[in-house]
Image: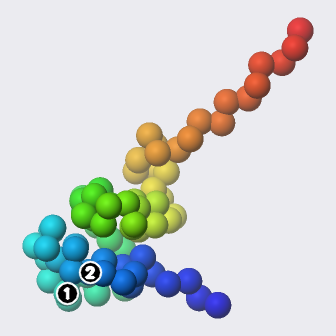
Amino acid sequence: MEQMHPLDMAGVRPKIIDALGVSQQAISNWKAREVPIEHCASIEKATDGAVTRKDLRPNDWHLIWPELVKSRKQPAKAA
């Protein structure tokens, strides 16, 4: 079963349109292509975290926002 695109979540598009001042067509274009990097943090904020930067850019978020990557610290080895 195909997963729903984050921009199709209920109530998300009106929040994005209001917060970013973009058109419905722009959002449809982003869905078909990719959400521009410069809008992702604003979308995350406008949706109160319901749609995250990770959701919007699943293939490259870790390269764009490395601070979102949780460090994988290994426990100290016993001597």
Q: Quadrant of residue 70?
A: top right
Position in image of residue 41 (x %, y %): 29, 56
Assess disc 2: are there few (<14), some (14-19) or many (≥20) residues with their C-alpha within 10 Å of its C-alpha.
Answer: many
Residue 20 horizontal side relative to residue 56, left or right: left
Q: Quadrant of residue 67?
A: top left
Residue 36 badge: none
Q: Nearer the viewer, residue 73 or 46?
A: 46
Element type at marker 2? helix
Residue ID at (64%, 90%): 1
Q: Which residue is mark 1?
A: 24
Q: Nearer the viewer, residue 34 or 68?
A: 68
Q: Is residue 42 above or below residue 7?
A: above
Residue ID at (20%, 88%): 25
Residue 25 horizontal side relative to residue 57, left or right: left
Instruction: Look at label 2 and name its amino acid.
Output: Arg
Instruction: Look at label 1 and name its amino acid.
Output: Gln
Residue 13 badge: 2
| Residue 57 visible in the snapshot | no
Q: Does the CB distance between marks 1 and 2 fall below 8 Å?
A: yes
Position in image of residue 6 (x %, y %): 42, 76
Position in image of residue 27 (x %, y %): 26, 81
